[in-house]
Structures are given as structure tokens and as C-alpha cells.
Image (cartoon, rainbow, N blue to C red):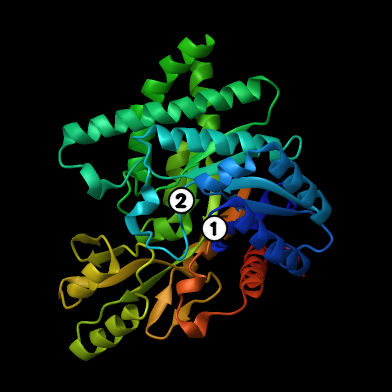
Amino acid sequence: MQLSDHSHITYCTNIHPGENWSAHFAQLQQYVPAVKQEVSPDKPFGIGLRLSNTASLELSKEGALDEFKSWLKAQDCYVFTMNGFPYGGFHHTVVKDHVHTPDWTTSDRVFYTIRLFRLLASLLPEGMEGGISTAPLSYKLWHVRCETEKAAIMETTTLHILQVVEQLVRIHRSGGPSMHLDIEPEPDGMMENTQEFLDWYLHYLLPLGIPFLEDKFGMTAAAAATAIRNHVQLCYDVCHFALVYESAENILQQLQQHGLKVGKLQISAALKALMPADVKAREAVVNVFREFNEPTYLHQVIARKADGYLHYPDLPQALEDAANPAVEEWRSHFHVPVFIDSYGVLSSTRSDIEKVLQLQRKQPFTQHLEVETYTWDVLPAELKVPMDKSVSRELRWVLQQLELPVM
């Protein structure tokens, strides 16, 4: 829904299963009206749409798209953002590192993303900007063994992203909406923190992109740089940046320093806990973490030490090293409900959300806000409640943090 400062808030429909369009549309029809009634009964409700590759192909058919548009109008809903990170199955299957498949080294990722933007351009209300979040180029643990290989991957992926930028420029120049690709850093991605995002943007995207757009459109270098900044932005996933121990102030200050934008704020929380030196106390913490060790999603763990950090690619590897005396804190990539702060001896990174929403309230830095807790199906049983109630409660909590009216 649209907020008083012209920004929009929603939840990501990657929470709902359905990898083909008919199955996912059925989920939207079941849950979106109920959520809207809870949080936005008298105003249009925005949707953060997640489409698999298969669903995007099916929705691209004229009849399906017209039916969806009619349903949106009837329900007083609209689409303003999409999640283009997971390409294939995201529920009831082993996802793990395949969430990055295909990565930005492939043409499949390019074609899929351009298709999503064409759908978004057709769905966006007139005069509204749109954005699509996407994977952070690739997954580090697949293939980065030396600096030469890393440079080759960074160049290849950047040139593929520029093919998308070209289409976004063409759409906007032909009278279509302004849309941006929002890069989403996460642990073990080719970009997992602000510095890596900046390094890529300043040392690959702009140097390759400026001459690319000059050649394609006859732009000046300055105009090309402006176009890139408008069409490629950051997806600030609060959970992901909390995992790498970055503060909101630092992230936003660095982006502002380089004239870069936040296209979407994904509101999500991770698990964390101090790791006691006492053996029994530590064992109690580790045993609770074991309850969250499930086989569907990646749950990277970043451990804080006095002299730096340890990265574990998934929770099982961290559990194997749980007795490491140098480790003082664990943070695990498990999207837990944003409104819960304590899980017994564990806690969440909810305070990071509170801080970033406080900054958004004081001086808005993005127009797109999206709650993204997608792990309801795999949460411990005591945390599960009906889906529409879960989503509505999260959205109401976020509105409270923004000091906005809550139904």
C-alpha cells in the first residue's frame, strides 16, 4: 500500500508456494484479499510479486496477463515490485545454493529478468516506478579460486546485467515506466556487503556501462552514468546486512557518498546469539540452533571473533565447529518473524530493522519496502500460525515502527 511519503509497503509473495502461474495465482487469490482486509481495507494494496521462470512464461501469455490485471483491479491491488532472485523451485524442494541457479554468468538469467521487467512494465500503475530484486551475480563457493577467475566472472556478469539496463533505458525512452534492477547482496554471494557492492559498481558496472550506453544510445558519459544509477540500485535486505555486522548508518552513508540508491528495502530478521565460554551454557545455545537446522534453505552462519569473522556456508558446518573457543557470537541466515526479538537463549536481529526503519521515517531513502519472511513452512511448530495472520501481523508491526496508522 502507498504510505504518506509516497513510498509503498508490501510483503513478498515468495512466502506462497506454486512454481507455475496457476498454482501461484491460486495462492494469491486465497491470501492477498485476507491480508489487505487486515492492513489496508480502504486503500489500494501493493503486491511484491515473486514469479519463477515457469510462472513468468505462463503469465506472459495475453489471456493470463489480462485475467491477472482484471483480478488486481477487482481486488483494489497493484504490483510495484518483484522478487527475481529465485529462478526455480522455492518451496517443498531442496533449494540451498541452487537459489543462485542460473546465475548472472548465464543468458537464462538475462532472459528471465528482462521478461519480468516487461511484465512489471505492463502491471505498474501509471506514473509509478518499479523495481525487481535479483541475485548478487553468483555464488562465491562455486568457482572463485583466484583473482583472475574472479575478474572474469565479474566482467561476464556485469555485461549480462548491462543487457537488462539497455532494455530498461529503451522502455523508459519509449514512454514506459522508470524501473530499476535491485542487486541483493547476501553471505557467500559475489557481493555480500556494502564494500563489495561498491567495488563492483565503481570498478565494473560504471566503467563497462558508460561506454556501453554511449555506443547504444549516443549518450554523453554523464548521461550514461546517470542512467546506470537510476536503473541499477541496491536491494537492502536487513537480515543479510545484519549477518555481516554492518550498521544501517554506515551502509546509507557510503551509498550517499557515491550517489547510489536503495531500490528496495527488504525487511527481514536473522537469528543471533552470544556464544558463552562456559561449556554447558554454550551447549544450551547450540541445541536451540539445532532446532532451526532444516534441509530446504541455506542458513549461512557468520561468527564474530575478537580478531575478525568466520564464515560457515551453512548451519551444519557451524554446528560441527560449535565448541570453537575463539567464537564469541553467531548470526545465522534464517528469516524469522520480524516482530519477535527473543527465542529463549537465542535472539533476532530485530533491532537492526528498528534502526533502519527509524532512518527511513526521518529521511526516506527508498520508495519500496517489502517484508520478506519466507520460512514459515520450515519454522519450529510453536512459531507457526495461519499465513494471512502472520503476514498481517508483520506488516502492522512495520507500520508501527514507521509511526503510521495501523488498522
Figure check: 12 above or below 379: above
Question: Quarter of the image holding residue 200?
Answer: top left
Q: Would you say residue 195 is visible in this rendering?
A: yes
Q: Which residue is mark 2?
A: 86
Q: Nearer the viewer, residue 229 or 72?
A: 72
Query: Residue 10: x percent and y percent?
Result: 65, 57
Query: Residue 213: x percent and y percent?
Result: 48, 17
Are there few (<14), some (14-19), or many (20+) residues within 10 Å of tag 1? Answer: many
Distance of label 1 from label 2 (alpha carbons)? 9 Å
Q: Would you say residue 258 is visible in this rendering?
A: no
Q: Which quadrant of the rendered structure holds the C terminus?
A: bottom right
Query: Residue 357: x percent and y percent?
Result: 57, 59
Question: Quarter of the image holding residue 371?
Answer: bottom right
Q: Left or right: where does residue 188 sit relative to residue 366? A: left
- Asked if the residues shown at circle 1 and circle 2 are in contact, with their CB atoms under 8 angstroms apart, the answer is yes
Amino acid beneath label 2? Pro
Q: Which residue is mark 1?
A: 14
> Please, what secondary structure does the residue beneath circle 2 have?
loop
Q: Left or right: where does residue 110 sit relative to residue 191? A: right
Q: Residue at x 53, y 12 (%)?
A: 217
Amino acid beneath label 1? Asn
Q: Residue at x 30, y 76 (%)?
A: 274
Are there few (<14), some (14-19), or many (20+) residues within 10 Å of tag 2? Answer: many
